[in-house]
């Protein structure tokens, strides 16, 4: 169950932070509307990983659509394009 508190509760931020646990963020409201959230660092790390995964999947889907539209390249062309790139780093 989410914890919802007004922003004014941050005057005593210690009591607000005590309510934050992994999987249970605290949502802060301003004028009765959601304004901010405070979440545990584990939740933040998971959120960032999920964002990165979504971005990767979007890029992969864009590549697949491009290949279906413009045609796929051969495995030899792929290998020759990337051959030697790892040695430069």
Image: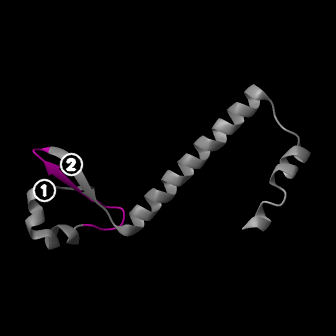
Q: Is residue 26 magenta?
A: yes
Q: Residue at x 9, y 69 (%)?
A: 12
Quarter of the N terminus within the rendering: bottom left
Instruction: Tell me, yes or no, whether the two marked residues, 1 and 2, touch with CB atoms within 8 Å.
Output: yes
Residue located farthest toward the right when viewing the structure as drawn: 76
Residue located farthest toward the front when viewing the structure as drawn: 88
Q: Is residue 65 left or right of residue 45?
A: right
In the rendered structure, find residue 7 and report the number of the disc placed on it: 1
**Which residue is label 2 attached to?**
35
Quarter of the C terminus within the rendering: bottom right
Q: Residue 14, located in which quarter of the rendered image?
A: bottom left
Magenta segment boundaries in residue numbering: 20-32
Quick check: 48 above or below 73? below
| Magenta segment main secondary structure | loop
Quick check: 34 above or below 26? above
Q: Residue 11, located in which quarter of the rendered image?
A: bottom left
């Amino acid at each position: 169950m989410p914890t919802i508190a007004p922003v004014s509760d941050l005057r005593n931020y210690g009591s607000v932070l005590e309510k934050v646990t992994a999987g249970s963020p605290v949502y802060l409201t301003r004028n009765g509307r959601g304004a901010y959230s405070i979440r545990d660092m584990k939740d933040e790390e998971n959120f960032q990983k999920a964002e990165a995964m979504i971005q990767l999947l979007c890029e992969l889907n864009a590549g697949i659509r491009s290949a279906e539209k413009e045609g796929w390249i051969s495995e030899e062309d792929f290998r020759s394009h990337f051959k030697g790139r790892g040695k430069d780093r």
